[in-house]
Amino acid sequence: MTENHQAPPPPPPDSGDRGGAAPGRPPTVADVLALPVLTAGQPQVVTGVSGLDQPVRWVHITELTDPASFLKGGELVLTTGMPLPEEPAGVRRYVDELADIGAAALVIELVRRYHRPPDALVHACRARGLPLVTLAKDVNFLEVTQVVHALILGNQAEVMRRTQRVHEAFTALTLRGAGPEDVVRAAAEMSGHTVVLENLVHQALVCEPSGHTVEVALTGWEQRSRATPPADRTAVSGPESWLVAPVEYQGERWGRAVMLPAPPGPGVTRSFGPEDVTVLERTAMALTIARLIHPTPWERVAHRNVLRDLVEQRHLSPADAEARVAALGLPTRDSRFVAVLTDVPREDDTTKAEALLSDDLRTKGVQALTGLLGPARLGILLSLRPDQPWRPVVEQLGRTALGVTPGAAVSVGGATTDLPEVARSFREAIRVAEATEPGRPLPAGRSYHERSDIGLRSLLFALRADTRIQDYAERRLGRLVDHDTAHGTDLLTTLRHYLDAAGNKTVAARHGGLSRETVYQRLRTIERLLDCDLESGGQRTELHVALTALDVLRAR
């Protein structure tokens, strides 16, 4: 029983007799059979349906008994059947030679010698998996060769043009000093595949998804990557059929670029074409050059980018964020996260502090991401065991920061077990940092500041740029300050001593080194100038807030 399959109907022609081959790739047997010049012969696929996706390199017309001696592989062989031997052994030899040389398919016209394919031919082609196609009507073989060869040559020219565009694009990236993110993004856009840059310990430093989400691309990355053997050149590797290319640095392998197959879907091919190989080869080359001209270690750059995305909540989904963080080697399951900020006095010290703190945490076995969040600000995301106290870790981190950059201020946010809540933890740390005056003494027994340290003065310091705070201080105390300036008095200090003493005039006099009578006189003058009643607890509170606001505004 033969496998009779009508060839697929031809697609609408786009120009002349061009078939369904995608631009830039060789036509397959199925593409050629869909050409009008062949569909006119009513082709039927008798055997080898699974081989219809084989590329056709050329078309060969033959009436010889040994056509294989003139072939190089990949040819679509056209024959009227006239040279076929009568005996089955000769037919098997004929088919074996075609299959051994790698012919793409055998097309036989059933017009002159045969009206049905010989059983021996069908059995021999089926045994070797060689596609056998019959034509029920007369076809002009010369016209077939002209059309198919024009299609092949046109695709080859398109491949050359596309390859040239790939080379030009990566050359332009290299000349403008593009970083790894730019290079990987360009590779994904040109190929239509997800592209990942990883280092030697299988940490995904850059991921540019195309067709995948970050979650799908990076979930379980280290285990999947370790199952994909390295290759000395660009090649398909591993159980998921990744296309991989080594990336070098100063003559040694540094990591690799990975192109993931397209996700399954209708009409989607998961195989890689020659252009994909070219794109990934040029990607690896551009990354090698970028590694030479960008001195900052790319692991550090990756940490910075992920931290900024977490702080600014730029991930598409919580699952994407978790996959990206885990792909950098930070535990995300059964972990407790703590956000820490380190503000250094001089911007020039930030990069040094970033490197030293990162190395110190790694040496102590603390899992963390460390990266710049601003010109003089470092962000640190600690990933701790759920039962591990975070205060000793942050205390040690604060002491290290002070040792590296004296005058550094370390602020910490609240702990959370939910990675998406890390942004909230960083916001809390930012509020603490904003409320911490430069040079402010550390709390007793601590090397860091936390939210519970924010008192009235700290709150007003954080809000000092708000014009409402400035207006309030000026409305309540401006006349008193103007009087002191105009008359050379120091009533503001007397008011401070009185308020600090909670309205006790005797204590205020002692603190100011004045007699009680002098204090009484000055307080009456203050009441007159400010139109207030200093015996009122509420008004004293308002003045105390205004005086504290004035102090932090002057501290700027």
Image: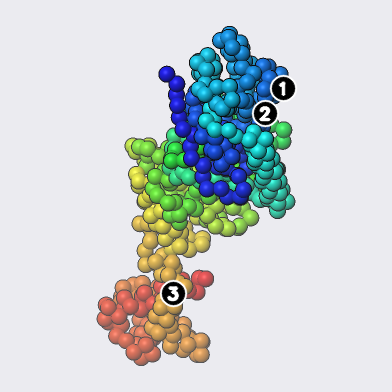
**The residue under label 2 is which amino acid type?**
His
Residue 554's x, y, as percent? 50, 74
Q: Closer to the camera, 283 or 349?
A: 283
Front of the two marks 3 and 1: 1
**Label 1 secondary element:** helix
Name the image quarter holding residue 359: top right
Q: Which mark is residue 329?
A: none
**Label 3 secondary element:** loop
Q: Which mark is residue 60?
A: 2
Q: Closer to the camera, 502 or 114?
A: 114
Residue 388 shows in the view? no
**The residue under label 3 is which amino acid type?**
Asp
Q: Which residue is mark 1?
A: 70
Of pointers 1 and 2, the one earlier in the residue sequence: 2
Residue 162 shows in the view? yes
Q: Which mark is residue 466?
A: 3
Of pointers 3 and 1, the one earlier in the residue sequence: 1
- Residue located 45% across and 72% down the image: 464
Front of the two marks 3 and 2: 2
Residue 242's x, y, as percent? 54, 33
Mark-to-mark CA distance, 3 and 2: 83 Å
| Circles 1 and 2 in contact, beta carbons < 8 Å | yes
Q: Closer to the camera, 409 or 525?
A: 409
Mark-to-mark CA distance, 1 and 2: 9 Å
- Residue located 63% across and 20% down the image: 82
Mark 2 neighbour class, 10 Å CA radius: few under 14, some 14 to 19, many 20 or more: many
| Circles 3 and 2 in contact, beta carbons < 8 Å | no
Vertical side of 120 occupied by 71: above or below? below
Residue 276's x, y, as percent? 61, 39
Vertical side of 236 occupied by 65: above or below? above
